[in-house]
Image: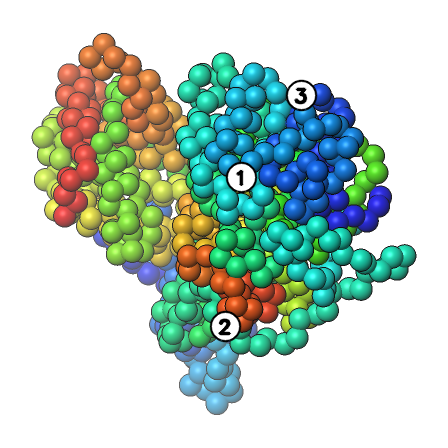
């Protein structure tokens, strides 16, 4: 085990899979010579050559379209959307085509590609570098959506995503890149897509999250433990396919549920989980389902005070948990 | 002075009763109207109150003994002598021996989820320069090396945090006696047969929380009326250890005698039809949400079946009849017996004049009877005068059964379990909810033609029910 950052884990996963399979290649803006704006591909162009680490023009539709065509022909492309905020020009390639190809061809054509997207705010990135985009893909059948929170999960899941024969949207919260560090095995490993991970076992309230806010949830759980409330923290890790079993098992055990995400509250992942639990664990609920999420504003504000106000932090999560515990 | 208490006359044509259980022992004091003994007659168990205040001197009959009405059963010394027992104020606990059961175990928590792999959760670094959108990102952050990362600072006490949207529903407002119960509390209370009014609530506004219920369950035997039936398998082992002898209870003996009488005297025949209850299933589903709060219980299929049977009985009066030796006795009232599995055996309370109730009314009346049957609160009237019997054997998972007629009635009908089946309709295969209904009938009164006609009438009515059908 070696302590690594999330960005190092991502870089290692890409390098190992490129080493393992010659069909794997990366295409994106600044991924080659510069090594990516977050250095996810640092050093890879030198190692694998510029025909496998391809610098693309500022044209997301092209990046996605080229990757899609290559995937049709059996390659395993990893297109990078430099910031998830920039994905919109390529939505037709991604949702209109990639998500539907396998289904539309009755399985004859598969799309083994991984769309990496740094996403999320809290980094003073302002309106165009802080967006949470997961709900759009979460809503779209045909895409797998992965959103790890730790270096260990990021590496294991990214390797599985690259080996998956379906389009996988791989969401990397950019604030976790260097902020979150953790042990990563030195030996080869992968983690299954579609399995949540209980990061903290508890008995009073189930707290579900993913990505950056998962860590704020763990902080809040410690605060609540000091107040005598035992929180179980479930890290979804994968949004699609959703690990409903882990969620339902936990809620059946605790009887109460709170969901935390940075994305806007309305119609978000939390709304779907709330509906799931209401449908399938209704008789186990001992309190209202709480959501502690980003507010419904068009995008992350730039001013520090406003950005702080937007972000679900440990304090805010603890506050919501306190209300739920008292119920 | 001492007063002899007699086995009271409890109803017309009841000539004897069995001592079920003494509720007082010799030497104990008893108040006027306080229960003295449980008497079993027919299938009713009733408590006989003491007509006087005093001290129990002798019990003149043993538990299990059957005596004629009017027979002396106990002597009570009245308290008019100065040496009489001091006024006893302690209330008497009614022991319900057969109902005693070990406290239900608290719900086992769902199997614990295995812990996260150690060391894989990671930790947050603090005070790292934020990664800028374009330029700043290329700068690697210098980090302290060779030392354990500082733990993230604990959050300080709850500071009122602004803005980030937190949606937690408000708690119920007033601590009223009829506070709303959460689904978890309702389910647990039902599973463990707990009267939630006995549970002190510790939640917001006095709400009863799931933990309150679990603690209540764990706190020991609960004095509930409808505990699950105690096993009746205590008995004596034979000398060679190969057999165990269980003393039959009075209720068991009465059931046995009634069954023997029925099969000995009544030449019965049996028939069955299959009913498509898809419409009924949909009807019930469509009205549960509205009706169940009024009923205070789950709406079953029973009232719908009762309605159909009762109407069919009106159409085929010879099914609502008895064999009179030289005549057939038609019963002018439709009093439907409902077989109920009570804690110590089968009991058949009777829904009198069932033809005068709507489906909604039948639901309420049937629930009341079943509740009282299970809690031994039936009166003698409740079990007498039945003219036809209905048994929902489907509740036990049965797909077909051959019931024994409840003597001296003309027939007994069972409803079997509802199962989705592939059936052929107009040369196409459809998935429908199907249920068998079975009929045993007294062949002295009716032939197969009438029996089949009757079953068809029940079937037609059940198949005619669909969403939109009125239950009032």
Q: Is residue A38 visible?
A: yes
Q: Is residue B181 left or right of residue B348?
A: right
Q: Residue furthest bottom?
A: B82
B58 vs B145, left or right, is: left
- Which residue lies most toward the top here? B427
Q: Nearer the viewer, residue A231 or B354?
A: A231
Q: Do the dots labelled 1 and 2 sit on one chain?
A: no
Do the residues at pointers 1 and 3 share their chain?
A: yes
Label 1 neighbour load within 10 Å: few <14, some 14-19, many 20+: some
Q: Which residue is mark 2?
A: B162
The numbered disc on residue A23 is 3
Q: Position of residue B196 (x, y in %)?
A: 45, 64
Q: Position of residue B11 (x, y in %)?
A: 26, 55
- Which residue is at the front of the view, B393 or B64? B393
Of callouts 1 and 3, which one flags the residue occurring earlier in the amino acid sequence?
A: 3
* Secondary element at tag 3: loop
Give left or right: position of B297 versus A282.
Answer: left
Calculate the distance from the C-alpha at mark 2 to the C-alpha at mark 3: 49 Å
Check disc 1 and report the residue beneath it. Answer: A58
Tell me residue A303's x, y (percent). 52, 68
Q: Secondary structure at mark 2?
A: loop
Mark-to-mark CA distance, 1 and 3: 24 Å
Within-10-Å neighbours for mark 2: few <14, some 14–19, many 20+: some
What is the spatial separation of the Cα atoms under label 1 and label 2, in whole angstroms? 38 Å
């Amino acid at each position: 085990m070696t302590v690594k950052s999330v960005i190092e884990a991502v870089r290692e996963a890409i390098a190992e899979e490129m080493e393992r399979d010659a069909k794997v290649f990366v295409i994106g803006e600044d991924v080659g010579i510069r090594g990516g704006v977050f250095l996810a591909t640092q050093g890879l162009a030198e190692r694998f050559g510029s025909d496998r680490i391809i610098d693309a023009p500022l044209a997301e539709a092209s990046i996605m379209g080229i990757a899609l065509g290559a995937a049709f022909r059996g390659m395993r492309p990893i297109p990078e959307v430099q910031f998830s905020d920039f994905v919109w020009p390529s939505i037709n390639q991604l949702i209109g085509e990639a998500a539907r190809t396998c289904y539309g061809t009755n399985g004859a054509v598969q799309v083994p590609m991984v769309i990496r997207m740094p996403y999320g705010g809290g980094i003073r990135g302002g309106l165009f570098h802080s967006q949470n985009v997961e709900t759009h893909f979460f809503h779209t059948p045909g895409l797998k959506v992965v959103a790890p929170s730790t270096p260990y999960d990021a590496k294991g899941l990214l390797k599985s995503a690259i080996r998956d024969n379906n389009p996988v949207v791989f969401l990397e919260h950019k604030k976790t890149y260097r902020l979150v560090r953790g042990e990563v095995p030195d030996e080869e490993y992968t983690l299954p897509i579609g399995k949540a991970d209980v990061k903290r076992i508890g008995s009073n309230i189930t707290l579900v999250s993913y990505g950056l806010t998962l860590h704020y949830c763990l902080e809040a759980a410690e605060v609540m433990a000091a107040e005598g409330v035992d929180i179980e923290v479930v890290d979804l890790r994968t949004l699609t396919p959703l690990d409903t079993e882990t969620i339902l098992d936990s809620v059946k055990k605790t009887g109460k549920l709170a969901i935390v995400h940075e994305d806007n509250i309305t119609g978000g992942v939390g709304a779907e989980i709330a509906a799931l639990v209401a449908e399938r664990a209704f008789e186990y609920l001992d309190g209202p389902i709480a959501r502690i999420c980003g507010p419904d504003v068009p995008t992350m504000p730039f001013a520090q005070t406003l950005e702080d106000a937007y972000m679900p932090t440990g304090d805010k999560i603890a506050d919501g948990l306190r209300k739920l515990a008292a119920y | 002075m001492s007063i002899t208490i007699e086995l009271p006359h409890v109803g017309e044509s009841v000539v004897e009763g069995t001592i079920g259980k003494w509720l007082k022992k010799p030497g104990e004091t008893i108040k006027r109207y306080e229960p003295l003994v449980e008497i079993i007659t027919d299938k009713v168990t009733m408590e006989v109150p003491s007509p006087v205040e005093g001290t129990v001197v002798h019990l003149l009959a043993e538990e299990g003994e059957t005596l004629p009405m009017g027979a002396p059963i106990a002597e009570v010394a009245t308290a008019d002598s100065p040496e009489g027992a001091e006024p006893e104020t302690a209330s008497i606990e009614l022991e319900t021996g057969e109902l005693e059961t070990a406290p239900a175990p608290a719900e086992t928590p769902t199997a614990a989820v295995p812990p996260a792999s150690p060391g894989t959760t990671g930790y947050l670094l603090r005070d790292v320069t934020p990664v800028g959108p374009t330029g700043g990102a290329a700068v690697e952050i210098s980090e302290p090396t060779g030392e354990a990362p500082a733990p993230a600072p604990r959050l300080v006490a709850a500071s009122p945090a602004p803005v980030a949207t937190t949606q937690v529903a408000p708690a119920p407002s007033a601590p009223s006696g009829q506070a709303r119960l959460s689904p978890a509390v309702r389910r647990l209370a039902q599973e463990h047969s707990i009267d939630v009014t006995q549970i002190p609530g510790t939640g917001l506004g006095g709400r009863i929380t799931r933990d309150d219920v679990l603690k209540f369950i764990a706190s020991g035997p609960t004095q509930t009326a409808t505990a699950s039936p105690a096993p009746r398998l205590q008995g004596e082992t034979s000398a060679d250890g190969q057999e165990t002898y269980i003393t039959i209870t009075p209720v068991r003996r009465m059931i046995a005698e009634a069954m023997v009488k029925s099969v000995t005297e009544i030449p019965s025949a049996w028939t069955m039809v299959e009913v498509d209850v898809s419409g009924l299933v949909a009807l019930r589903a469509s009205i549960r949400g509205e009706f169940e709060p009024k009923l205070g219980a789950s709406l079953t299929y029973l009232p719908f079946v009762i309605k159909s049977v009762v109407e069919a009985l009106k159409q085929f009066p010879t099914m609502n009849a008895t064999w009179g030796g030289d005549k057939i006795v038609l019963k002018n009232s439709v009093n439907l017996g409902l077989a109920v599995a009570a804690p110590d055996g089968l009991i058949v309370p009777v829904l009198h004049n069932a033809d005068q109730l709507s489906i909604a009314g039948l639901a309420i009346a049937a629930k009341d009877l079943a509740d009282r049957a299970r809690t031994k609160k039936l009166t003698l009237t409740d079990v007498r005068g039945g003219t036809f019997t209905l048994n929902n054997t489907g509740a036990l998972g049965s797909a077909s059964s051959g019931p024994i007629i409840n003597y001296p009635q003309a027939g007994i009908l069972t409803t079997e379990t509802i199962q989705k089946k592939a059936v052929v309709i107009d040369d196409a295969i459809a998935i429908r909810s199907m249920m068998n209904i079975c009929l045993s009938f007294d062949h002295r009164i009716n032939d197969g033609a009438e029996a089949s006609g009757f079953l068809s009438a029940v079937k037609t009515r059940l198949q005619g029910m669909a969403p939109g059908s009125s239950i009032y």
